[in-house]
Image (spheres, rainbow, N blue to C red):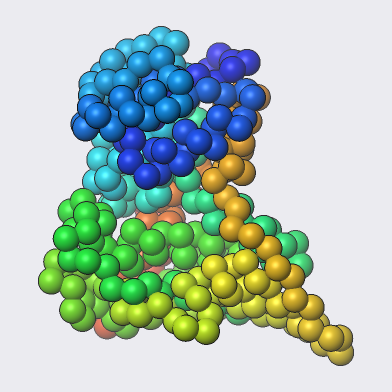
């Protein structure tokens, strides 16, 4: 792909996340959001006017056929991610796609094939990797022994689009891709297998709404994962993680903004941070486009963030452990 000095971008999907990415991209000198696309014409026009963009449209083809556009932000409902990413890749556009990359393994693989065939950059927007305290945790613990990850929300409304089994997949997939990615990111390895208990307890849409899983990673690293929407915890907050290694443990709570470090024989240390991520992932995306370097969170990372919850859900359904790494390797070999 040709090097660019200013990344001209278009956003497809002008809802909450489209507005957020447009806002933070305005803080990056090397990039500009210039085109705005949404099935709701008024949403596209309003964001275009607010951002000082060049045009708004309801026609995705207009964006993809615009030779002045270098990159496309895919911020639509989950079930449209794969088709839009493939179309953008075929049009030669670099891609930042909101999580999850797609809702099925096959769709993730199709996106990957399109990206590898066309040579475009694809960045999966798993922003929690850029949280201040997640970065600090990786710096402190390079070789974890055990990891616990919990992301529990209050009940999602049954008419919320992300709770639809086709459009969004439900909480365990829609938000669980963040959890699974962070577990893998902290472990620095791929998971070998998973055993899980849970299922559909009350959501009328039939999605898996609550799940408890154990992952076994290479080098026998163990990770437990609790994900669901039965209730937001009163003490830890929605996001909670603990990472254990020999002689040290790290605990993150309060949406990962509070970090407690315990070292053997030393006083506990508490670090207060903030909820970062959107600006940092946009900077990383722009950097890989401008400098023609590999994206730091690519389509394989997006595939794994989808595969891990799907295999956990499959385990909960039939009561048997499910392979992950071997499934990934077989899928990639067949791709």
Residue 251 place in picture, x, y as percent: 64, 77
Nearer-the-camera pick, 187 or 99: 99
Question: Is 327 drawn above or below residue 48 in the view shown?
Answer: below
Q: Looking at the rendering, which quadrant does residue 37 occupy? A: top left
Residue extending furthest toward the top:
67
Residue 7 visible in the picture: yes
Q: Residue at x 58, y 74 (%)?
A: 253
Nearer-the-camera pick, 191 or 211: 211
| Left or right for 311, reference 326 | left
Residue 74 place in picture, x, y as percent: 37, 36
Question: Is 256 drawn above or below residue 107 in the view shown?
Answer: below
Question: Is 277 drawn above or below residue 19 in the view shown?
Answer: below
Q: Quadrant of the C terminus?
A: top left
Residue 72 place in picture, x, y as percent: 41, 27
Residue extending furthest toward the bottom:
265
Residue 11 place in picture, x, y as percent: 39, 30
Q: Residue at x 57, y 50 (%)?
A: 277
Residue extending furthest toward the right:
265
| Left or right for 194, reference 56 | right
Residue extending furthest toward the left:
204
Nearer-the-camera pick, 142 or 267: 267
Residue 86 visible in the picture: no
Q: How many marks?
A: 0
| Left or right for 290, reference 103 | right
Q: Residue at x 31, y 79 (%)?
A: 230
Q: Residue at x 68, y 72 (%)?
A: 259
């Amino acid at each position: 792909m040709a090097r660019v000095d200013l990344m001209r971008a278009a956003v497809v999907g002008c809802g909450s996340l489209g507005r957020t990415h447009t806002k933070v991209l305005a803080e990056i000198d090397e990039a500009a959001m210039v085109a705005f696309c949404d099935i709701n014409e008024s949403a596209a026009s309003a964001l275009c006017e607010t951002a000082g963009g060049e045009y708004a449209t309801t026609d995705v083809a207009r964006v993809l056929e615009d030779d002045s556009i270098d990159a496309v932000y895919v911020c639509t409902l989950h079930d449209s991610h794969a088709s839009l990413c493939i179309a953008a890749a075929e049009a030669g556009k670099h891609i930042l796609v909101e999580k999850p990359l797609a809702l099925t393994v096959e769709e993730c693989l199709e996106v990957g094939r399109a990206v590898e065939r066309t040579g475009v950059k694809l960045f999966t927007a798993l922003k929690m990797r850029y949280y201040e305290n997640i970065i600090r945790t990786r710096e402190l613990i390079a070789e974890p022994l055990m990891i616990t990850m919990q992301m529990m929300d209050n009940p999602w409304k049954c008419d919320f689009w992300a709770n639809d089994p086709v459009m969004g997949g439900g909480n365990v997939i829609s938000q669980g891709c963040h959890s699974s990615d962070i577990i893998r990111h902290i472990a620095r390895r791929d998971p070998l297998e998973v055993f899980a208990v849970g299922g559909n307890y009350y959501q009328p849409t039939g999605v898996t709404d609550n799940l408890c899983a154990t992952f076994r990673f290479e080098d026998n690293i163990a990770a437990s994962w609790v994900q669901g929407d039965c209730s937001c915890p009163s003490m830890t907050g929605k996001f909670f993680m603990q990472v254990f290694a020999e002689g040290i443990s790290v605990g993150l709570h309060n949406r990962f903004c509070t970090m407690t470090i315990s070292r053997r024989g030393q006083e506990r240390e508490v670090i207060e941070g903030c909820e970062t991520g959107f600006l940092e992932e946009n900077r990383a995306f722009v950097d890989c486009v401008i400098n023609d370097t590999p994206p730091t969170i690519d389509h394989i990372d997006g595939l794994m963030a989808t595969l891990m919850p799907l295999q956990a859900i499959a385990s909960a359904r039939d009561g048997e452990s499910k392979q992950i790494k071997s499934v990934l390797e077989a899928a990639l070999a067949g791709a």
